Amino acid sequence: MAQKLKMSRVGVWSRINKLRRQGLSIDASQNRGYRLAAEPDLLNQPLLEAWMRESGKTCKVFVHDEVDSTNSFAERLLANGEKGPFAVLANSQKEGRGRLGRSWHSPRGGNLYLSVGFKPNVDILKLRSFTLWQGIQIATLLRSLTGIEGISVKWPNDLVHDKGKVGGMLTEASIDCERVRSLVFGIGLNVNCPLKRFPSSLAKISTSLEDLKGESFRIHEIAAKVIKATLAGYAACLKGEAEKNLVGKWKELDALADRRVVVSGGKKKIVGTARGIDSSGALQLKLRNGRTKSIQAGEVTLKE
Ligand code: BT5
């Protein structure tokens, strides 16, 4: 290693110790060298960048220990002239958020809190199904990466399994004259953080990849691959490929398919059977009177 890096063995040793202090677990063996024994659960920027190179897709990344919200951080970067795409990641969030003022529980270490910022400057129609399409991309990725078959999408922005919610997505955009000027796609994914660190009411309805598989996952690898899937999903939306394949792909991963559900929006509640989505991304709800209602926005819960 010293020869390859053109430095002294003491120099290598001191850098290895620096990496150990950053949380990397490195084994040493006399006359053989060093080996990365386990990857840390806390984010390490060079390690993330190495995984991004490995995954074949890179963009600028901003790694933090704690932020208010990675979505807010990305919005500020875009407002200050940062060009997209870039990714913002944090070990924890003080004000992680979901939709409609709800919060996203974001304990430190082991879970993914990631936002990707874009400057699209395209017609709003091109991105109207963006969150649904990203859900398909990420659920597909997680199934193949973890072997957990039951990971599904729940309209409009959840990643779920029968055991509970494993992740959520939040897309925020600034729109002007029907054009999307800036776009932030945020995802929170429960990876390795033990559910006992969740408030008990939330632990009951949540799950994590570790909880589902019984083993922990490399957070940097997952982050790099989710970033890659997000960039590819965005490109597919701009090219119009997403819209063509949306309905069919959603069907393969739809947690609500043919389930009796209650849709609430404001004070109204509608009961029906979920029958997938249409090409605009609206939920198709079959009502008791046989009609199908298109739902553009709302909250869906399973009917007991
Ligand atoms: C979401 O909202 O599911 C979108 C969550 C997006 C979070 C990411 S983290 C990175 C980026 N930065 C941010 O500030 N946000 C994004 P919604 O559909 O409104 O669901 C919120 C509800 O999910 C809460 O009211 C809880 O019931 C539940 N919840 C909160 N934290 C959770 C967690 N860690 N795991 C599972 N469920 C959770």
Image (cartoon, grey):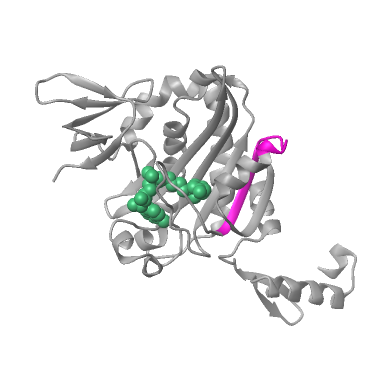
Q: Residue furthest left?
A: 289
- Image point (33%, 57%), residue name: 206
Asked if one can make out residue 148 in the rendered structure from this viewpoint, the answer is: no
Quadrant in the picture for residue 6: bottom right
Q: Residue furthest front?
A: 267
Asked if one can make out residue 282 in the rendered structure from this viewpoint, the answer is: yes
User: Is 180 above or below relative to 257?
Assistant: above
- Image point (85%, 63%), residue name: 4
Q: Is residue 299 left or right of residue 179?
A: left
Name the foreground residue: 229 vs 304: 304
Q: Is residue 136 left or right of residue 116?
A: left
Q: Is residue 10 left or right of residue 61?
A: right
User: Is 259 above or below relative to 276?
Assistant: below
Q: Position of residue 41 (x, y in %)?
A: 55, 65
Q: Residue furthest bottom?
A: 30
**Dividing the image into 4 quarters, which one contains the N terminus?**
bottom right
Name the foreground residue: 278 vs 293: 293
Q: Position of residue 246 (x, y in %)?
A: 40, 25
Name the foreground residue: 222 vs 121: 121
- Image point (48%, 63%), residue name: 107
- Image point (57%, 17%), residue name: 177
The answer to if 80 sits in the magenta stretch is yes
Q: Position of residue 115 (x, y in %)?
A: 56, 45
Q: Position of residue 287 (x, y in %)?
A: 14, 25
The answer to if 16 sits in the magenta stretch is no
Quadrant in the picture for residue 56: top right
Give the residues in magenta.
Answer: 78-91
User: Is 105 above or below relative to 170?
Assistant: below
Q: Is residue 74 left or right of residue 109?
A: right
